[in-house]
Image (cartoon, helix red, strand yellow):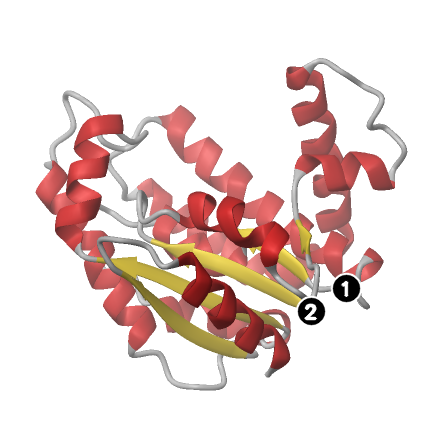
Amino acid sequence: MIIEITGEPGVGKTTVLREIYDKIKSKPILFSDDLVLKHFKLNFIAPVFLRRILTDILLFLMFLPHFKKYKALLFSTIKGLKDTNESKRFKMNILRNTILKFGRFEFISKYFTQKIVLVDEGISHIPFNLIDYTGRRNIDPESIFTPLATVVSQIKVIILHQKLINISHRLARRGHKRIKQGKDYSLEQFLHRNSQLVEAYRGMPAGIFLSKNMLELDDKIDYESIIHFFERTIEK
């Protein structure tokens, strides 16, 4: 079973997973580069850069035999990125991340079918990568996932959401790759477009994913309640 965690940048996805992972009773696996390298007996390699390159290659090789399955979404992604006001390097990185998300899914599906695997920003996160913050193009997650019906119907998705003001403070303090000087959109636009996309996820019809649940986070995160939430998601 694959459970993906998605949501706005800065909402606390990685922090939540780090805090609750060891406390979930069912003892799921948390996807990471280490998981891939261990499986292929390459975890002895120490340099971080080399580990990342090897993981990318292995996940790309997992994706390649299934290219036809993802072709429609890949071409749609390329077309959308052409209209986005970002650098060529950034667009290539988004495309790379999209392909690696597909590779992750195929890797987990092939080697961990009997396990519960938590994935931070998997396939369900792709629309967040494709947002055009200048407002020229709206993202419809349903249309993105429709060509992948046989894939996403196997994924349980947890969408984290927190009040915008909290994310605003956090992003203003630590920044984000897509909030830079010289961009023709503001932090407010960045937050607004992400919030719009969360609402689009909220309004998606049932049956796209195996399951879809919204986890609302308050000012003071109650990790005990979050653990129960994850356990209920796993059990259903």
In three-dimensional space, the C-alpha distance between marks 1 and 2, rounded to whole angstroms, equals: 6 Å
In the shown orientation, is residue 190 left or right of residue 68? left
Circle 1 sits in a helix, a strand or a loop, which is it? loop
Q: Nearer the viewer, residue 225 or 169?
A: 225
Image location (x, y in percent) of residue 97: 52, 41
In the shown orientation, is residue 16 left or right of residue 11? right
Q: Identify which residue is drawn at 66% across, 26% down.
A: 52
Instruction: Kindly identify which residue carries mark 2.
Output: 1
Q: Identify which residue is drawn at 20% across, 28% down.
A: 173
Q: Quadrant of residue 94?
A: top left
Image location (x, y in percent) of residue 230: 52, 68
Q: Identify which residue is drawn at 80% across, 59% down.
A: 112
In the shown orientation, is residue 158 left or right of residue 171? right
Most extreme residue toward the top, as rendered? 47
Q: Quadrant of residue 39?
A: top right
Dot 1 alpha-carbon crowd within 10 angstroms: few under 14, some 14 to 19, many 20 or more: some
Above or below for 13 versus 51: below
Q: Nearer the viewer, residue 167 or 217?
A: 217
Disc 1 to disc 2: CB gap under 8 Å? yes
Amino acid bearing label 1 = Lys
Instruction: Kindly identify which residue carries mark 1.
Output: 115
Image location (x, y in percent) of residue 19: 50, 47
- Quadrant of the rendering where the N terminus is positioned: bottom right
Amino acid bearing label 2 = Met
Dot 2 alpha-carbon crowd within 10 angstroms: few under 14, some 14 to 19, many 20 or more: some
Q: Quadrant of residue 169?
A: top left
- Quadrant of the rendering where the C terminus is positioned: bottom right
Q: Is residue 57 visible?
A: yes
